[in-house]
Image: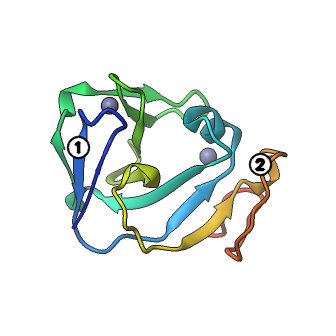
């Protein structure tokens, strides 16, 4: 069981089961949405993801580049919490930085490296892909 929250603490959630490795996305949309050099996502099945507080404070914004994809964030503090897709109703992509430490998972891969912020250097050995990783 892992717990997490948004910055202001209004939204709280729990993840049951083992965590998947962290997927790093360097695409321009993720950089804008996160305000950092990349997004750090952990795919979690909806069966294993429970909002325990503040669900009514979550707001969804549909992706401009991928209709049917929604970025879900706390409307009080703006923390990104998850994204979800209409085409994958069984899984959410949890923003790894909202999890309370300790988290022992490693990075699975870097994707959309061709679009990465020029000021950021990747300093780990995880695989890098110019766009999506091969299926
Ligand atoms: Zn918040
Ligand atoms: Zn991205």
Q: Residue at x 46, y 28 (%)?
A: 62
Residue indicated by mark 2: 116
Asked which secondary structure carries label 1, the reply is: strand
Q: Nearer the viewer, residue 97 or 50?
A: 97
Q: Quadrant of residue 108?
A: bottom right
| x, y percent for residue 101 | 37, 62
Quadrant for ligand 1 reads top left
Q: Nearer the viewer, mark 1 or mark 2?
A: 1
Position of the N terminus, as image quadrant, is bottom left
Residue 86 versus residue 59 in the image, above or below:
below
Classify residue 74 as left or right of residue 17: right
Assess mark 1: CB under 8 A from ligand 1? no
| x, y percent for residue 59 | 33, 26
Residue 31 versus residue 103 in the image, above or below:
above
Q: Nearer the viewer, residue 127 or 96?
A: 96
Position of the C terminus, as image quadrant, is bottom right
Q: Quadrant of residue 85?
A: top left
Residue indicated by mark 1: 12
Q: Residue at x 38, y 26 (%)?
A: 77
Assess mark 2: CB under 8 A from ligand 2? no
Classify residue 108 as left or right of residue 112: left
């Amino acid at each position: 069981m892992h717990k997490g929250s948004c910055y202001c603490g209004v939204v709280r959630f729990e993840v049951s089961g083992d965590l998947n490795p962290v997927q790093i996305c360097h695409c321009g949309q993720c950089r804008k949405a996160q305000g950092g050099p990349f997004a750090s996502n952990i795919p979690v099945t909806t069966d294993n993801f429970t909002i325990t507080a503040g669900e009514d404070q979550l707001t969804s914004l549909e992706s401009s580049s991928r209709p049917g994809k929604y970025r879900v964030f706390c409307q009080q503090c703006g923390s990104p919490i998850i994204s979800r897709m209409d085409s994958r109703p069984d899984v959410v992509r949890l923003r790894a930085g909202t999890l309370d430490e300790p988290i022992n998972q490693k990075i699975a891969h870097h994707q959309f490296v061709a679009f990465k912020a020029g000021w950021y250097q990747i300093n780990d050995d995880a695989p890098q892909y110019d766009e999506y990783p091969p299926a």
